[in-house]
Image: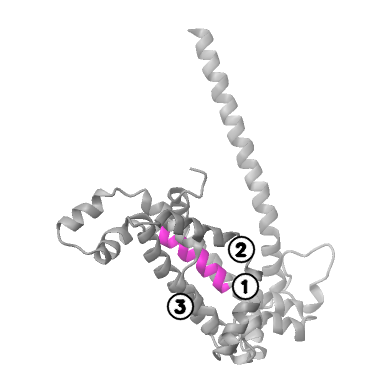
Amino acid sequence: MSSQSSFFQSRSKMRKARLILVEALLIVLSLVFLTPLVWMISTSLKKLGEVWITPIQWLPSDPQWSNYREIFEILPLASFIKNTVFVTVLATLGDIVSAVTVAYGMSRLRWRGREFVFAGLLGTMMLPGVVVLIPQFVMFFRIGWIDTFYPLIVPSWFGSAFYIFLLRQFMRGLPIELDEAARLDGASSLRILWQVLVPLCKSAIVTVAIFSGMAHYNNFMGPLLYLSSNDKFTLPLGLYWYQGRYGNFWHLVMAASTVSVLPLIVLFFVAQDQFVRGVSFSGIAGR
């Protein structure tokens, strides 16, 4: 008995030591990844002459909160934010609606060729996005959509293979008896989808919304290709344009960058629980 007790105690100590080591490693990695963010925020509150002082002065001696007011005065930042929010909301909504609808057909409805079509859909994920840039630009140019928001929004309403795959995997884990019971009550397929399955897929849908929202919010290549008017610029393109003209004023560039990053940080902390659950039960976390 004593040997067994000492064996379990040693295993418990090893497990605790391993846990402490993993936590210490995560803390170190977190500090490494947080360093650029902290430097950006710190620089945004400095005077121009303090930006390149060595060693780095992490806490500004005299925080310049006026830097944030100044970037709104010299830069149409409010217009960039409005355009970004408009494009992000509509494009994210399109990704969610199209992914939910197609994923339902791929996971809950039985029809000939379903697995073949799904395999072809997954095959599109192997195609680099840069390959279709020129054909898409030519198509949008011919229908007169250049310098409009349509090329940034409309494609999202035709579905994304990754989001469809994520939601399909999640829906496949739900009991099929739910659909059968709803059909016995006279519910149509559309009603089953939106009133039965969608509430159960909340965490996966939030995950899709976070992925899609971040992708559209940070999208630089699309606006660079299709937008040419300053009043239609989104935040990434507007900041790039501003840096090209005022790149020497790094304190103001960092202030504008902080304003652009802040919504993503808030979004993640608000929805992180749903995000983790959606990834865990969708089949992309190694389960």
Q: Residues within 10 Å of mark 2 (few under 14, many from 20)?
A: few
Q: Residues within 10 Å of mark 1 (few under 14, many from 20)?
A: few
Q: Is residue 286 left or right of residue 21?
A: left
The mark that comes first in sequence, 1 or 2, is: 2
* Residue 53 placement (x, y as % from top left): 83, 69
**Looking at the image, is mark 1 or mark 3 nearer the viewer?**
1
Going by the numbered disc 1, the residue's amino acid type is: Val
- Magenta-highlighted residues: 204-217
- Residue of label 2: 127
* Residue 49 placement (x, y as % from top left): 82, 77
Q: Quadrant of residue 250 in the image?
A: bottom right
Nearest the viewer among 142 and 287 is 142
- Residue of label 3: 90
For the residues marked 1 and 2, what is the alpha-carbon distance in whole angstroms? Answer: 9 Å
Check disc 2 and report its element: helix, strand or loop.
loop
What residue is rendered at 68% in x and 47% in y? Answer: 28
Whether residue 1 appears in magenta in the rendering, the answer is no
Check disc 1 and report its element: helix, strand or loop.
helix
Q: Residues within 10 Å of mark 3 (few under 14, many from 20)?
A: some
